[in-house]
Image (cartoon, helix red, strand yellow):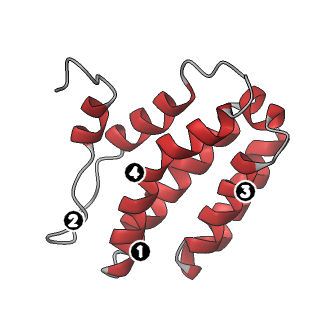
Amino acid sequence: MIEQEPDFESLLELPAAGGENRPLSIKAIRRQAEQAFQGADFEWGYAREIKRDLNPPLKLAAGYLARNDAGNSALIYRTVIEAILDNENATLGDEEGQLLGMVYECAVAAPFSTLKTLIHLTILSATD
């Protein structure tokens, strides 16, 4: 199946949101988020495809948050925000604002204790 759909391989690297609360290795999350932007053709609907590809890590973050694991949840949200802002051509070219909307959704969904940090990182990244 992986040979037919190579994009599934990155999903296998994502950890499950169940089990014990232990520190999350963010490498697989970062790789998945960066991969969402690779091959963006900037044709109509490209932002929707990127958003679809970013959904698995966001669902994982929501799962951690539901289990009161604020640290791992915030780490995933921050990584997704960074990936969106690091790909400014795709983000600024998104006329519908779906990608910046995801930044907002991540900030709203993030645990309150980390919200200030996420907003601060977003502002710093946007001004660089």
Horizontal side of residue 58 vs 89, given as left or right: left
Between the residue at mark 1 and the residue at mark 4, the CA separation in whole angstroms equals: 18 Å
Between the residue at mark 2 and the residue at mark 3, the CA separation in whole angstroms equals: 30 Å
Q: The disc labelled 4 sits on which kind of residue? A: Pro
Between the residue at mark 2 and the residue at mark 1, the CA separation in whole angstroms equals: 11 Å
Between the residue at mark 4 and the residue at mark 3, the CA separation in whole angstroms equals: 17 Å
* Disc 3: CA contacts within 10 A as few (<14), some (14-19) or many (>=20): few
Q: The disc labelled 3 sits on which kind of residue? A: Gly
Q: Secondary structure at mark 3?
A: helix
- In this view, 62 is above or below 121: below
Between the residue at mark 4 and the residue at mark 2, the CA separation in whole angstroms equals: 19 Å
Q: Label for residue 56? A: 4
- In this view, 3 is above or below 37: above
User: Which circle, 2 or 3, is nearer the viewer?
Assistant: 3
User: Which circle, 4 or 2, is nearer the viewer?
Assistant: 4
Horizontal side of residue 25 vs 61, given as left or right: left
Q: Which residue lies under the disc numbered 3?
A: 101
Horizontal side of residue 30 vs 87, given as left or right: left
Position of residue 20 measured from the top left corner of the image (x, y, whole percent): 15, 71
- In this view, 89 is above or below 106: above
Horizontal side of residue 123 vs 4, given as left or right: right
The reply to whether dot 2 and dot 3 touch (C-beta < 8 Å) is: no
Mark found first going from the N terminus, 4 or 3 = 4
Q: Which residue lies under the disc numbered 2?
A: 22
